[in-house]
Image (cartoon, helix red, strand yellow):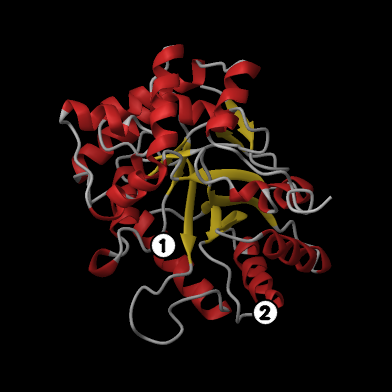
């Protein structure tokens, strides 16, 4: 396994992050426990979840499954860099959403209970709060850090200026501030290159891309369709129709260079200097083992250039749209 410091922090995390949104939804608990054990066996130490996973009446279930896995002992908690998130409402009562000091306190304690641990390694804001002032947010976080309940703080789905504002306010309070940003980033969706990546780089944040395969579009979807192993419907079918010409070129190129499409998409992310760890969401052990193979893939400049031709990216703002 390869490791990298998370942003400017001293925290070492694996180059792949195990996403657990599927726990209890697409993965039964026993299977989830097996996948987490195999992740550890392969040196993958970075796990990501959220209090709201997996949504609706099952909110909190992902954390509970991880908590029961930790309870098995044998160093499972100690070997894990645990990341979770808060923001979304956990019930219909007031003060149970966003980033108020009250909700941060309640959400953190509830996550700790579900996860059966006494601290969170990386506590992430799942979305920017446009109502609560940053002074209040950082004051609540400072209390939690002093209590030993969290070690590091990250953001998710922030704009570049949100990161800048958060960091400026944290600095005024004498706090470390954010060390990571978790965002939607892959070969197809490259908007982050405009302002989020430059902001993260300037402020010392590691970037954790979610949906690295664009909901499966970069995972060999056309080949799977031809083989009859996957049928897309609804939004997935609409997304494929929108990007089909690019996907056809992409899958043909992957075949030409002898790399599986999913592996190629993950490898491209690992070659981006601002990316710390893409978040993978394997539903099976085989999918996990397949994803781990990406760590041995090296893409030369010609391959990277061809991928940029198929999926054009962005220059940093304002050069992307101005002289």
> Where does the image place residue 205, in percent across and percent down from the top left?
69, 47
Of badges 1 and 2, nearer the viewer stands: 2
Give the residue at x 64% y 69%. Answer: 143
Q: Is 229 on the left or on the right of 306, as rendered?
A: left
Q: Residue 180: x and y, percent?
A: 63, 49
Q: Quadrant of residue 226?
A: top left
Q: Please say if the residues under marks 1 and 2 sit with CB atoms less than 8 Å apart.
A: no
Point out the residue furthest to the left here: 228
Taking the view exactly as shown, the residue that stands out farthest to the bottom is 94
Instruction: Bin the neighbour count of mark 2 within 10 Å (Cα to Cα): few under 14, some 14-19, many 20 and up.
Output: few
Q: Is residue 40 visible?
A: no
Q: Is residue 186 above or below residue 58?
A: above
Q: Where is residue 200 drawn, in percent x and y?
A: 70, 49
Quarter of the view holding residue 174: bottom right
The crowd level at tag 1 (other Cα within 10 Å; few <14, some 14-19, many 20+) is many
Quickly name the residue at label 2: 133
Q: CA distance from mark 1 to mark 2?
A: 23 Å
Q: Foreground residue, 145 or 272?
A: 272
Secondary structure under badge 1? helix
Side of 285 where 144 appears, left or right: right
Mark 2, secondary structure of its residue: loop
The residue carrying mark 1 is 111
Whether residue 233 is visible here, answered yes or no, is: yes
Q: Which of the marked residues, 1 or 2, is nearer the chain's N terminus?
A: 1
Q: Closer to the camera, 316 or 112?
A: 316
Q: Residue at x 58, y 74 (%)?
A: 129
Would residue 228 be found to the left or right of residue 262 on screen?
left
Up the image or down, 321 lies above or below 297; here it is below
Residue lying at 49% horizontally and 50% vertically, measured from the top left: 83
């Amino acid at each position: 396994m390869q490791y990298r410091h998370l942003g400017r922090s001293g925290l070492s995390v694996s180059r792949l992050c195990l996403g657990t949104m599927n726990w209890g939804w697409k993965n039964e608990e026993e299977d989830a426990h097996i996948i987490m054990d195999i992740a550890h066996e392969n040196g993958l130490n970075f796990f990501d979840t959220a209090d709201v996973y997996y949504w609706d009446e099952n909110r909190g279930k992902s954390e509970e499954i991880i908590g029961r896995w930790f309870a098995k002992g044998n160093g499972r908690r100690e070997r894990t860099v645990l990341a979770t998130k808060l923001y979304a409402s956990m019930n219909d009562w007031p003060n149970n959403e966003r980033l108020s000091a009250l909700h941060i306190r309640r959400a953190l304690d509830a996550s700790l209970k579900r996860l059966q641990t006494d601290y969170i390694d990386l506590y992430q804001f799942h979305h920017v709060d446009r109502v609560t002032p940053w002074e209040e947010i950082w004051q609540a976080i400072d209390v939690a850090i002093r209590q030993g309940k969290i070690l590091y703080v990250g953001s998710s789905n922030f704009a570049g200026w949100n990161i800048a504002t958060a960091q400026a306010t944290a600095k005024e309070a004498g706090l470390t501030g954010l060390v990571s940003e978790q965002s939607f980033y892959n070969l197809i969706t490259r908007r982050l290159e405009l302002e989020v990546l430059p902001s993260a780089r300037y402020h010392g944040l590691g970037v954790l891309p979610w949906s690295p395969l664009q909901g499966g579009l970069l995972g060999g979807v056309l080949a799977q369709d031809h083989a009859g192993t996957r049928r897309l419907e609804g939004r997935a079918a609409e997304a494929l129709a929108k990007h089909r010409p690019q996907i056809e070129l992409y899958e043909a190129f992957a075949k030409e260079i002898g790399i599986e499409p999913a592996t190629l998409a993950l490898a491209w992310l690992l070659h981006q200097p601002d990316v710390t760890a893409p978040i993978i969401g394997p539903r099976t052990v085989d999918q996990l083992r397949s994803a781990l193979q990406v760590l041995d893939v090296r893409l030369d400049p010609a391959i990277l250039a061809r991928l940029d031709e198929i999926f054009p990216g962005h220059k940093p703002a304002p050069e992307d749209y101005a002289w």
